[in-house]
Amino acid sequence: MCGIFGVMGGDTGQFTPDQIYKIFNTLAVRSEERGREAAGCAILYNNQISVFKQPLRISRMLKSKSFIRFVNDKLGLPIAIIGHSRLVTNGSQSEENNNQPVVTDNVVGVHNGILVNEEEIKSQYDIQQVSGLDTEVLFKLIEQERTKTNKLERVLKASFNKISGSASIAFFSAKDDALALATNTGSLYYALASELNLGLFASEMYILNRVIETSIPKTRRQYFKIERLEAQTGIIVDYSNLAHIKFSLKTDVTDITVNSSPRYNIPVIISQSGKRKELPKCTKCLLPITFPNISFDVNGVCNYCRDYRPPELKGEQELQALVEPYRSKNGNPDCILALSGGRDSSYGLHYVKKVLGMNPISFTYDWGMVTDVARRNIAKVCGSLGVENIVRSPDISVKRRNIRLNIEAWLKSPDLGMIPLFMAGDKQFYHIARKLRKETGINLVFFCAGNPLEKTEFKTGFCGIKETAHGSRLWNYSLKNKVDLIKYYGKNYLINPAYFNRSIWDTLHAYYSTYVAKDDFVYLYQYIPWNEKVISQVLEQNYGWEKAVDTNNTWRIGDGTAAFYNYIYYTMAGFSEYDTFRSNQIRAGLITREEGLKLVEQDNKPRYESLQQYALTIGLNLDYAMTIINRAPKVYSENSY
């Protein structure tokens, strides 16, 4: 089970803030063997509660630069610090909300144990749970009970009488100037040295014994008497002077106020490592300073905005003239359209069939990462339009294995320029289009990629490549950039030999299909305007087109890899594909910068359901992967700008 622990020091004691902090560190390290998967602490000092947590073992957290910065201005007297060393029982530690201390509106606390009736409590008290933790439900129950009485001991009694399971807790309340401990199992031990104005608690007697023996001077150890907080017992401690009341959680108790003048509404400041700092951004679009090859003028406008020119569409008239020679006279198929089940290609099929009046065959390259919602949308659109859909699929188990192997290699040495390896397996759809052209004898092939608003050159930008003039045809990259790309990947393969795995032939084929083999496909959105609202409206009203359940954005929902790699980009670089998309919308005058800021805030929220499905599909340990990603060096580190 998890380890919970803490220290309290009054302002008239015989220990300095630094000495108290060292004692806390020792408590933390001693408690680590109870859980090594995540850690955190909360500090009550100077009428403020500050919280910090990370998805890694506590001994590493204590040494991290971000944690050292966190505690620098929070050590003084009086002070109380509580900590948590987590053994995961429910709720992935890679999701920040699932780690402790848990923060509700008015309670900050840690919990060791498992509730077995959390669903019943949530229903009875209308508790909205935002994490995967039963601890959140427990503290929100305590928070609700606190509104009924000013007596914290009665709050704890009422709360513990409503829970089933095991619970040993320590918490601060923003409405009470005290530290509360309670347990229904007896898994809490404390030592209050009132003469020294110093108190300690931990999950085990052995831990407290060892801390007192190693961190307290011999002449002061006599003042520490370790006591067990018996099952069904609570204690409330005024951390400024160690005045306390111990009480039963089962029997009636006399109302006693520990501090007659509590400091109400103590602010809670969350300083969690997973939150990236605010990045300097272009004053016209949303691109941050971490975007590859970006620069700003004196007005804060980026070079991408300064160099922006509205795309010159070839127009529907030219498109009609282009397709006319291919048009079937007898209703037979006369063109091929690549259909992923995503937004752009689904609308593209509608447009080619309904507006151009062509008779398309669609094809889908299902390489193992086409999502279920994409497959349903393919069925809906093709069924409604009466369009044949040809599916080509490789050995999906091999494809998924290759993805996993490349991700596992990448995790050994995270590098943003190498992320496209995760998607190398899908690049053969270019090759499939060329094959179908030969097999069917149909020469006109539509691709619905190339929407000018969805450019993502930053992916090769992280390899040091600057290329924008390829016209959505990646084989159009300059020879120099193609060679430089090979050099970049070659260097990383040599640095990290784990990339030399069974996926390498698939990767080489992907490079050939993307950057070497030429095509003359028709890219639909180089002819007609792209309008998100119109496209979504047409698809939803005419075909019952579905969206993903974990995002309001309709882009990339057909691609099972997108949630994962966008999580990496956003975590490590401070932006994702969505920032580039919304920035392009702003430049095109489709939305305002203020609208873009609101949209991208939602776009960049982690899609945990999709992440879990992705990991399950390829056999990836998601918690391990996300822990590495969260700990990886950030482009937006303190020294990056």
Image (spheres, rainbow, N blue to C red):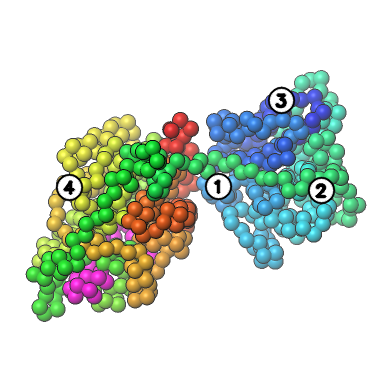
Residue 122 in the image: above or below residue 262 = below
The C terminus lies in quadrant:
top left
N-term-proximal mark, 3 vs 4: 3
N-term-proximal mark, 3 vs 2: 3
N-term-proximal mark, 1 vs 2: 1
**Any part of residue 167 in sight:** yes
Residue with the mark numbered 3: 19
- Name the residue rendered at 30%, 51% in the picture: 455
Residue with the mark numbered 2: 233
N-term-proximal mark, 4 vs 1: 1
- Distance from disc 3 to disc 4, alpha carbons, whole Å, reads 64 Å
**Any part of residue 35 in sight:** no
In the image, 595 versus 452, the foreground residue is 595
Q: Are marks 3 and 4 in contact (CB under 8 Å)?
A: no
N-term-proximal mark, 4 vs 2: 2
Mark nearest the camera among 3 and 4 is 4
Residue 558 in the image: above or below residue 209 = below
